[in-house]
């Protein structure tokens, strides 16, 4: 096992242990990252070739992850955890590594970290015996753990549950193909619809709603952030109040993006 692979496996196992994830599937990677380490995750519309990036504010130390909207939900889930791998490894604070035109060690580590965090090797070892894994089993892993067929196939090959030839065949399959063949296309379509829409972090939206109620944020802007109609939000939230009447409760002087060590989320 390479040094990069060992770091990724050990770091993913440690992360699951520290945050009491066990070997269970991670249902919502956006919320998991926020709850585990306090980092906001956004999804925004971007070119199909774009997957994700991590950002660090050098003044506040605040970090954020941004991923692209996509009709491929397993890719988006992997992208979020790839960026989490960069944060765990400290790549944002380190100088760039690798050579131009080559995939850098930090990228290799982040890929492997996402794979191990999504689908721990322990799950494979406990569920299957060597050479007794079927295509239906692959579908169960992809559906249950929200990962791509390629990632599941790598983990199966790593634990010697499938041969190299089967790995090469299965790694070329699409999630949609498995969903159609094994009867969970409705679930996959729902996931694809969700991953194809922009998503703002919960604590940012909570503060945005408070700002709207305080008269500091317009309804049109709030509706764009939420991806909901202005009329619907007005019906849910009512009209904004006068800023002076709620300033003490909300704190209009507080930054909308507080530092991790500063203001608590609204």
Image (cartoon, helix red, strand yellow):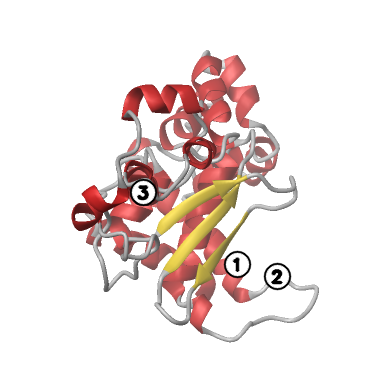
Q: Are marks 2 and 1 in contact (CB under 8 Å)?
A: yes
Residue designated by label 3:
211
Residue 63: percent from left, percent from top: 44, 68
Q: Is residue 67 left or right of residue 237?
A: right
Q: Is residue 195 above or below residue 109?
A: above
Q: Residues within 10 Å of mark 3 (few under 14, many from 20)?
A: many
Mark 1 or mark 3: name the one nearer the start of the chain: 1
- Of all residues, the one furthest to the right in this rendering is 101
Q: Are marks 2 and 3 in contact (CB under 8 Å)?
A: no
Q: The residue tagged with tag 3: helix, strand or loop?
A: helix
Residue 266, labelled with which disc?
A: none
Depth check: give the residue in front, 86 or 136: 86
Whether residue 154 is visible = no
Q: Nearer the viewer, mark 1 or mark 3?
A: 3
Q: Are marks 1 and 3 in contact (CB under 8 Å)?
A: no
Residue designated by label 2:
103
Mark 2 or mark 1: name the one nearer the start of the chain: 2
Q: Which image quadrant is residue 48 in? A: top right
Residue 108, labelled with which disc?
A: 1
Residue 166: percent from left, percent from top: 64, 38
Residue at image point 51% right, 26% down: 229
Q: Is residue 167 above or below residue 251?
A: above
Q: Residues within 10 Å of mark 2 (few under 14, many from 20)?
A: few
Depth check: give the residue in front, 181 or 65: 65
Q: The residue tagged with tag 2: helix, strand or loop?
A: loop
Residue at image point 44% right, 47% down: 217
Q: Which image quadrant is residue 66 in? A: bottom right
Q: The residue tagged with tag 1: helix, strand or loop?
A: helix
Distance of label 1 from label 3 (alpha carbons):
41 Å
């Amino acid at each position: 096992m390479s040094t990069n692979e060992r770091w990724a496996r050990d770091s993913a196992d440690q992360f699951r242990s520290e945050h009491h994830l066990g070997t269970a599937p991670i249902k919502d990677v956006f919320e998991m990252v926020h709850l585990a380490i306090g980092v906001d995750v956004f999804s925004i519309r971007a070119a199909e070739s774009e997957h994700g990036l991590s950002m660090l504010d050098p003044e506040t130390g605040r970090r954020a992850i941004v991923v692209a909207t996509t009709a491929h939900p397993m890719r988006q889930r992997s992208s979020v955890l790839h960026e989490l791998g960069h944060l765990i490894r400290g790549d944002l604070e380190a100088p760039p590594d690798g050579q131009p035109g080559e995939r850098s060690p930090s990228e290799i580590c982040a890929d492997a970290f996402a794979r191990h965090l999504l689908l721990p090797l322990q799950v494979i070892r406990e569920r299957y015996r060597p050479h007794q894994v079927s295509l239906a089993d692959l579908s169960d892993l992809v559906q249950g753990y929200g990962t791509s067929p390629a990632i599941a196939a790598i983990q199966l090959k790593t634990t010697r549950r499938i041969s190299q030839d089967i790995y090469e065949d299965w790694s070329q399959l699409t999630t949609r193909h498995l969903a159609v063949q094994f009867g969970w296309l409705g679930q996959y379509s729902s996931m694809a619809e969700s991953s194809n829409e922009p998503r703002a972090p919960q604590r940012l939206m909570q503060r945005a709603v408070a700002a709207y109620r305080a008269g500091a944020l317009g309804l049109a802007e709030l509706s764009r952030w939420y991806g909901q109609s202005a009329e619907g939000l007005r019906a849910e939230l009512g009209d904004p109040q006068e800023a002076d009447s709620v300033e003490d409760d909300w704190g209009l002087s507080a930054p909308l993006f507080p530092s991790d060590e500063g203001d608590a989320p609204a």
